[in-house]
Amino acid sequence: MMRITGCILGASLVVLAPLAHADMNTLWGEQAMNLRADEAERGQLFRDGNYAMFIHWGLYSNLANKVDGKTYYGIGEWIMNENMAGIPVDRYKALAADFNPAEFDAMAIAQLAKDAGMKYIVITSKHHDGFAMFHSKANAFNIVDATPFARDPMKELADACRQLGLGLGFYYSHWQDWTAPGGGRGPETYADGTRATFDDYFREKCLPQVEEITTGYGPIAIVWFDTPGGIPKKYVEQLVAVVRKNQPDALVSGRAGHGLGDYVTNGDMHVPHQNIEGMWESVDTTNDSWAYAWYDENWKTPKEILRRLVACVGRGGTYMLNIGPRGDGTVPDRAARALRAAGDWLRRDPQAVYGAGASPWGHALPWGDVTAQGNRLFLTVFDWPASGRLHVPGLKTPIRGARLLDGDAATAVAHESLQGWARLELPARAPGELASVIELELASAPEVDRTLGIDPELETEVLVDFAEVTGAAKERVSWMEKFGEWKEIDRVHAWEKDGAARWEVLVFAPGDYEVSLTYAGTGRIVWGVDVEGGEHIQNQQNASHNYQRFPIGWVNFPEAGRYAVSVSCVDGEREPASLKSIHFTPVAWK
Ligand code: H79
């Protein structure tokens, strides 16, 4: 944590030095691994509803990342922070007088979630800024008592969700409170100058407000605590006890801290690459910021939304995707349209997502991803092969039937087993523009060889996440592209002379493949690529401080089958040379 703070204060850096994953756990908190078996019915929410809407909406939304005419780039709910606009507490609190989200329409937002195919909504009832978006009797800095709006939008949303059959959860920042005396990163004294402790904040504001949100809004599905920071365990125990008492069916997010939550939340904005056991979610946002930022038009397309959703379900988890309504309560049209388009797709082929579980491959495949329900596999194809032939590596269980789904219509698909791969004969054109689903009915429970397959037609990216590494260091790192916008990858760096990252791969089509590497580093680097028992190629390329892809050369796989491929850092600046992945693209000749 110190390292990262230092980076931010050091300069107006856009890209920050990567943080080791262990340091990130300090930020997100130590998490619970599993829901206790005797309380497993609470887990039903995740099994049935693996797609949810997250909403960041608060006083900060009214600023939209512009203060005194100056725009700040980063996550909007952090606008108060000294690394953003640095707004003093009194000035921030006074902003409530201008907050009048008269256009807020709870039913329209709930209907958007419903149209998007989402099953529940989690909304910020209080973020780190301390402003309560509900009517709090415990603290007057809230939307009913401190603004001209004077309505309780959480009440309105609770009613709308109930009407539409959606679950509702409340985000509540329990440790941080930047405006309440004694809150985490908040003022250290009361207005009269007397010292405030965390215990004061907890008793006067946090605990009573959690009592309020768990009693005033009917049955709720989740209390989503965030960033436990330095909160002592005894406080989290009290909060969890309040949730259990008032809402016995509600889940508590893992970021409550001290392993007291019910499930794990991955690092912000991260979709994992490998299957994860147990109950977990990924939280993500439709653009770059969580809260509304006037400039942020970097929307995820409907296809990207579906890719990330299916990847989360395929890895065994749940996907919660955020929108940031404006200060007037309206939702940016592009976010709404992208969510609805993804929802229309889900209504056409819902089997691939709802009630579906993890891919037996444990990772994505070059053309898309797989989800499973019993003996049925759902192949969601995002990159349709132009040849009309889809190659599925390492499927050992015989296929009983294959169907291309298209809403109510389903067409039988011819299939054969070749060299341990399944090959499906598809129409040349995909029925869905965003993605198409093929259902495979297997003769028994799916059994697959998880070895990474190199597609004979599409590009295959093989990540170091799956590599065996010797004589170099593999670690998970996180960094921010801009303030609060996290990226997380596995990388291999600190290469010794004989260090290598090694993968086993399955090759279907013999021949030449273009090989490129995605890496970061400094200066010039000489990379070597070896096919065990076969070719060695090496080449020098430049490096960039962020991860970029550079071509290395061609390699040949003389016949179909299993190969070991390794990458080494032959020469140049080996310490910072940081490898993310190797790509194989078959060379087409006709
Ligand atoms: O609500 C969204 C974020 O505001 C919240 N989680 C999601 C769902 C979140 N709060 N904190 N963090 C995520 C971790 C961020 C830590 C940092 Fe910092 C903020 C790193 C840099 C800026 C704090 C301030 C640590 C260093 C400087």
Image: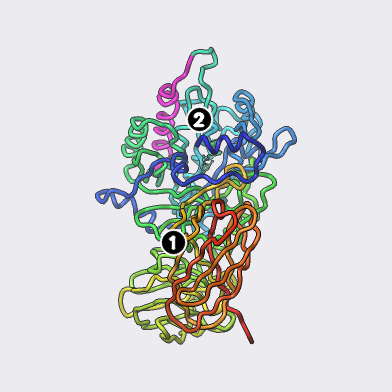
Q: Residue at x 56, y 71 (%)?
A: 537
Looking at the picture, how far across and down is residue 354, in whole percent? 42, 63
Mark 1 near mark 2, Cβ–Cβ under 8 Å? no
Mark 2 falls on what kind of element?
Answer: loop
Residue hosting label 1: 313
Q: Residue at x 40, y 29 (%)?
A: 207
Q: Earlier in the sequence, mark 1 or mark 2?
A: 2
Asked whether mark 2 and ligand 1 are closer than 8 Å, the reply comes as no
368 left or right of 447 in image = right
Looking at the picture, how far across and down is residue 303, in whole percent? 58, 64
What secondary structure do most residues of the magenta stretch adopt? helix
When asked about the image quadrant of residue 573, the answer is: bottom right
* Location of residue 320 with respect to 527 vertically, above or below: above
The label on residue 396 is none
213 left or right of 590 in image = left
Can residue 430 be seen here? The reply is: no
- Depth check, front residue: 220 or 89: 89
Measured in 3D between alpha carbons, the distance from the residue under mark 1 to the one under mark 2, in whole angstroms, is: 34 Å
Q: Residue at x 42, y 68 (%)?
A: 371
Q: Residue at x 24, y 49 (%)?
A: 38
* Residue type at tag 1: Val
Residue hosting label 2: 177
* Location of residue 26 with respect to 501 vertically, above or below: above
Mark 1 falls on what kind of element?
Answer: helix
Looking at the picture, how far across and down is residue 230, in whole percent? 43, 32
Q: Which residues are magenta?
A: 195-219
* Residue type at tag 2: Asp
